[in-house]
Amino acid sequence: EAQVTQNPRYLITVTGKKLTVTCSQNMNHEYMSWYRQDPGLGLRQIYYSMNVEVTDKGDVPEGYKVSRKEKRNFPLILESPSPNQTSLYFCASWGTGKRETQYFGPGTRLLVL
Amino acid sequence: GESVGLHLPTLSVQEGDNSIINCAYSNSASDYFIWYKQESGKGPQFIIDIRSNMDKRQGQRVTVLLNKTVKHLSLQIAATQPGDSAVYFCAENSGTYKYIFGTGTRLKVLA
């Protein structure tokens, strides 16, 4: 089954404790992205990747890091989480980059205390 | 379930009626548009898309209408069912790697 998976689905942590949210896709897509979703706001892009070892900032990259060492995986790293990073996070992947739909993971609910 | 948005506009329709959900897009250069459905606790799911060289596109029970003059997109759902209850939002793309997402509308189907 074609899918995007994320882990963990739910995470509670404390300020400053490094964490990683994993994302994996099995559709051989070149493009992957991380979004955060907050009440009253549309999905906002954090980082995206056009291929292995190629990443770029989205609209809200501060406080986040990403890596793309393999085509299928695109982890999101919070080196020192803060309460304003409490949010619902989605990973997405798509094939050729432009003018096509993205496939989303199930989401990761993060609470930073 | 997950709270996608606490202040989303809500559309309530009777089961079996047609639903119309609207979206105003922001970038006049956008030429590709997508409608997504997001159920509680799940990620957004693709419903239907349309390119700017079309005004209308139909899928199974869904129709998307595009009015480029006023930068408006609508999603019509025929014979709305309880399983259609979700948050619906549009996305636009102008041929770059960036997609702009709307905030969404919550659809409630009344039995």
Image (tube, coloured by chain):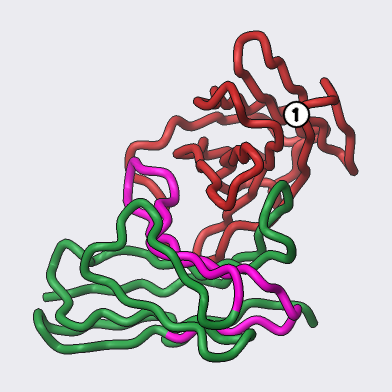
Residue A76 % position (x, y): 38, 79
- Residue A45 located within the stretch drawn in magenta: yes
Write the residue at 67% across / 73% down: A30
If the image is split into quadrants, where does the N terminus of chain B sit? bottom left
> Which residue is at the far top?
B69
> Quick check: B42 left or right of A36?
right
The span shown in magenta is A22-51
Return the chain for callout 1: B
Write the residue at 21% across / 83% down: A79
Residue located beneath label 1 in the image: B76
Callout 1 amino acid: Gln
Which chain is drawn using green? A
Do we see residue B1 in this rendering? no
Which chain is drawn using red? B
- Label 1's element? strand
Vertical order, A9 against B38 (above or below) = below
Do we see residue B38 in this rendering? yes
